[in-house]
């Protein structure tokens, strides 16, 4: 297999960054959901909605090949 070019490495780095952003947003949403559930909150709070939108936005930025995996959990 040939050594990756600088452009290919830049693409891989950007993809890794986008996946990391998605993971961070998902983790923040999960942590918030757990905190709110533990506090007895059963409705969608503004914070939940904000974090959920962050996950949706991060998923939209993922390269196409990662989107299906993201929907079922990376």
Image (cartoon, helix red, strand yellow):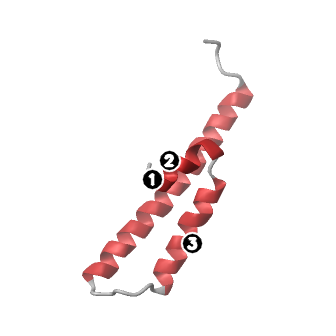
Q: Nearer the viewer, mark 3 or mark 1?
A: 1
On screen, residue 31 above or below 49: above
The CA span between labels 3 and 1 is: 17 Å
Q: Residue furthest top?
A: 1
Q: Are marks 3 and 1 in contact (CB under 8 Å)?
A: no
Q: Position of residue 43 (x, y in %)?
A: 40, 87
Q: Residue at x 45, y 86 (%)?
A: 45
Secondary element at image label 3: helix
Q: Give the residue pinned by disc 3.
A: 53
Number of labels in the image equals: 3
Work out whether mark 3 precedes mark 1 in sequence or the reverse, and give the earlier one: 3
Compare residues 13 and 63 and report the one nearer the observer. Answer: 63
Left/right of residue 21 with respect to residue 64 in the rendered view: left
Q: Are marks 2 and 3 in contact (CB under 8 Å)?
A: no
Q: Are marks 2 and 1 in contact (CB under 8 Å)?
A: yes
Give neighbour class at mark 1: few <14, some 14-19, many 20+ (Cα, 10 Å).
few
Q: Nearer the viewer, mark 2 or mark 3?
A: 2
Which quadrant of the structure image shows residue 1? top right
Q: Position of residue 67 (x, y in %)?
A: 57, 50
On screen, residue 59 above or below 45: above
> Which numbered circle lies on residue 46?
none
Compare residues 72 and 9 and report the one nearer the observer. Answer: 72
Work out whether mark 2 precedes mark 3 in sequence or the reverse, and give the earlier one: 3
Q: Residue at x 65, y 55 (%)?
A: 61
Compare residues 14 and 41 and report the one nearer the observer. Answer: 41
Q: Residue at x 64, y 46 (%)?
A: 64
On screen, residue 53 above or below 42: above
Q: Give the residue pinned by disc 2.
A: 69
Secondary element at image label 1: helix
Q: Position of residue 17 (x, y in %)?
A: 58, 47
């Amino acid at each position: 297999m040939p050594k990756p070019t600088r452009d290919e490495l830049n693409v891989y780095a950007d993809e890794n960054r986008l996946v990391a952003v998605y993971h961070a947003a998902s983790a923040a949403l999960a942590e918030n959901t757990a905190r709110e559930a533990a506090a007895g909150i059963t409705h969608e709070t503004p914070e939940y909605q904000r974090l959920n939108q962050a996950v949706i936005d991060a998923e939209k930025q993922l390269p196409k090949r990662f989107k299906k995996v993201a929907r079922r959990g990376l």
